[in-house]
Structures are given as C-alpha cells and as structure tokens.
Amino acid sequence: MAGHAHGPRSVARMVDRRVVRFLDAWAPDTNSGPLLVGVSGGADSVCLLIALAGLRGTSTLELHAAHLNHGLRGAESDADAAYVERLCASLAVPLVLDSADVEGYRKRRRLSLEEAGRNARYGFFAATAKRVGARAVALGHTADDQVETVLMHILRGSGLAGLRGMEPVSRWRVRGGEDLVLLRPLLETRRSETEEYCEVLKLDPCTDSTNESPEFLRNRLRQELVPLLRGYNPRVDEGILRLAAAAGEADDYLRQEAARAWRRIGRMESGEALIDAAGFGRLPPALQVEVLRTALSQLRGDLRGIEATHLQKMVELVAGAAGRSVDLPGRLSFVAGYERHQIGPRRAAAPRVLKRKRRLNVPGVTELPGWRVDARLVPVKGADLQASGYVVHLAPGVASDGLWAAARRDGDRFRPLGLGGAKKLQDYMVDSKVPRDMRAGIPIVWDSRDILWVVGYRIAEKARVPEDADEALRIEFTPKG
C-alpha cells in the first residue's frame, strides 16, 4: 500500500494502476454492459469516477454515474448534487440523479439514520443499474473505511465473518430481483491518497458536514478511537487490515467446508431449512456456526441482521435438550429437534397456560384464556372425521358427564388412538416432537376421568367415533390473537 513518501502525482498514478488491476481481475471482458458508479461528491467517489473515466480511451468500458440526494442537509445536499452534475457533464458520463426522504423512511421502518441511508442508497443503485443495464455498481470505499468497519464489528461482538470487513466484490440482496454486485476498487487505497488525487487534478470535492457529527458511531471511531489506537501503535491501521485479510481467508475456507457439509446434512423443504441433527452434532463448533449461516443464507438470501450472538445461541440450543427454540431476525425461528433442526417462519407464541380446569359448554361456545372453544353435535354422514389441527370429532357419548379443558399435570397418562396402550403424557409429547416451550400451553380435554384429546395432536382410543354412530361431537379450539 502506498504511503506519503510518494509524490502527489505518483500517488495518483498508483491509484489509477490499482483501479486497472482491480477491473482486470474482476471482469476482463468489459463488453458485458456498462458499469454504474456511485458518486456522492466526496473525495473518495470523485477519485474513483475520474480513475474509471480515464480508462475509456484504452478499453470498451462504458460508465454511468448515480447520485442520491438524501435530503438531510438542506442546501448543502443540493449543492452536492449540483457539483456531481457538473463533474459528470465535464467527463461526458451519463448521470442519474434522484432524491429520497431518508428521515421519513427511517421513522417508518424504525431504523438508525445510517441504516436508513444505506438501504435507500443501495435500493436506488439497484433500480438505476436495472434501468441503464449495468452489471454492477462501483463504490468509493477506502482502506480507512475498512479499518472503521472492522472496528465497528469488533465492538458489536462480531464473529469471523465480521472481522473480514467489506469485501472487494460482494452482493446486495434486492427484494424481488437479481442481486446487485458491489465493487470496491479503492479498498487498498487510503483516504489521504484519494484527497491527494483530487488535489493533483485541481478538483474541489464536496465535504459532508455530517461526517463531523459525534452522533454517528463511525464518526466517533474515526475521530476518537482510531487516533487513540495509533497512540499505542502508529501502524495499527495496517495491523487491522492484515487481520481483515486473514479473517477473510479463514472465512472463505470455512464457507467451502460448510457448503460441503450442507450438501450432506441439510436441505430446503416447504420454505424451511432442515438439518440432520446427528450429522450436525459431529461437526466442530466453528463449522456448526458456518453451516447455520449457510442454512440461513439459503432460506433468506442474505444474512443482514444475523449477528454472532444469534448463531451462538443456536449452537447452545443444539447442545441442550431437544425441543427448545429461539427467535431470529426476519420473523424466523430456530428449533433444535431430536432428529433434525429446523429454521423457518416463526411459530405463534405459546398459548397461555390454563391456570385451572374449566368446564366446556357442550353444545356451545366457551371462552378460555388464549382460546375460543366451539362444541356441537354434527351428523356423521358426509363429515370428515379425521382430526385436523385444532378440530376433532369425538364419540358423542363422551360428553354425557361433561367435558373439561385443563393444562397438563405431572403424572398424567394418556391412551392415544392407534398406539395400543397407555403412556405418560410427558412421554407422548416427547415422542411426538412437541417443542418443550409449547407443552405447558397445550390444552388437554378431559371427561370426568380420562384424557380425550391432546389439542392439536391426537385423541384417545375411547373418544373414537363408533362406526354405527349417526352423530359426532365436533370440537374446535381457535387460538386468540
């Protein structure tokens, strides 16, 4: 990496060579469509645009620029947009300008201002890339941005994937469309070098006043933490960048091994990621984490919002008793099972536990904590007597002495239909893979002596509708909310 020992013009030439080398490595064939450049008007993105524009005479590279006015700094934001417009006109680079109400978006989505701005910006880039037929968008992130990103991830408790920071080539998941390819040709270039580059060309790039605000974590890192760390080690930036590179190599290896493991023990089925429990248990912990990341990526398409703490909690659940679960971002949940683990849409919250036995109105409607129960006699002819979720048909005679709903109790026994004998209710729930955190909230329907129905699962042998019956007792439990 170039330092300040080089003269300004040699620094400019070095930046140009890095951009050429990056593009040659990424896409030797430049005939596959234009390249979109995100231009904020700051020194980094202006440097990138100029370097790319200079290549047009020696290649078939076609450029388009894109600038989004976030509307957060009033006249200053408008001046940035005007500057970018003049710059692109002077370079004969087509420009797409747009604006967004980032503050309004932030409030609607309840995001931080940084996250709202990033989402709005990348969404704009994706739409613009599709509009102009671009194959990727080039961004002006520098080595200094990388240092700050890695430090942010460390402070947030990141795993190995976070330590690698930003990647030279990555993808941004676009809802309902193709992924947007993100290119970072300046990731080996220091911010001071992009500033020198602009000085050599006598450019006057924009300055974003919000970059000085201590409201944002990245600014505080840049202004306070990084200078403090340099006091301990003047070359700490280089050390952090080496850490990011080493983490990237280790993470790449783990991803390859996880992909092989996923092909052996994982699969997608009915909108869920399923993982063989025995095979998963034989993996080393680091590979278990990466297989979970692979499963989530298969299911969601990206890992935004998934943090190391989520992955570690999933691994901890697997090491404990089966049947436990944890909620994940994106309205997903992870359930550690006996034979398989699954990641899928979040289950409804466990129903409220019945504090005492409650008599059911038969026929009639009974309101219970968390449930509405409808019980009535129906003709057997033409009725589907198979249990379905929260609806069953029972022998009408079972209600002669009354029916009750209650929570399970220690020692309860049950004679399930078709299983040929009695067993403890606890054992039945374990064998039926009822999640541990749901068991206490499952209502149990009783007559005066015995369990007739484990709601949502199975009826008792004695509750079977006789073949010669004309009527059946239909009971439906409807969860409230």
Image (cartoon, grey):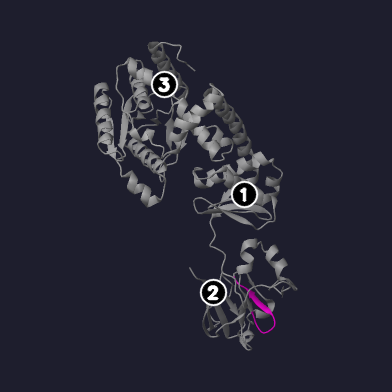
Residue 42: x and y, percent? Answer: 34, 28
Image mark count: 3
Tell me: 17 left or right of 405.
Answer: left
Task: Give, as a three-letter code, the residue at label 3.
Answer: Ser
Tag 1: Cα neighbours inside 10 Å, few (<14), some, or many (≥20)? many
Q: Nearer the viewer, mark 3 or mark 1?
A: 3
Tell me: 440 left or right of 108.
Answer: right
Q: Earlier in the sequence, mark 3 or mark 2?
A: 3
Tell me: 320 left or right of 66.
Answer: right
Residue 332: x and y, percent? Answer: 53, 53
Q: Which mark is residue 369?
A: 2
Q: Residue at x 33, y 26 (%)?
A: 63
Provide the residue designation for mark 1.
314
Res. 26 in view: yes
Q: Residue at x 29, y 17 (%)?
A: 202
User: How much space separates mark 1 and mark 2, taking CA atoms?
Assistant: 31 Å
- Would you say residue 371 sits in the magenta stretch? no
For numbered disc 2, what is the local secondary structure?
loop
Discs 1, 2 touching: Cβ within 8 Å: no
Residue range of the region highlighted in magenta in the rendering = 446-455
Q: Earlier in the sequence, mark 3 or mark 1?
A: 3
Provide the residue designation for mark 3.
192
Residue 71: x and y, percent? Answer: 29, 40
Rendered image quadrant of residue 321: bottom right
Q: Earlier in the sequence, mark 1 or mark 2?
A: 1
User: How much space separates mark 3 and mark 1, taking CA atoms?
Assistant: 43 Å
Tag 2: Cα neighbours inside 10 Å, few (<14), some, or many (≥20)? few
For numbered disc 3, what is the local secondary structure?
helix
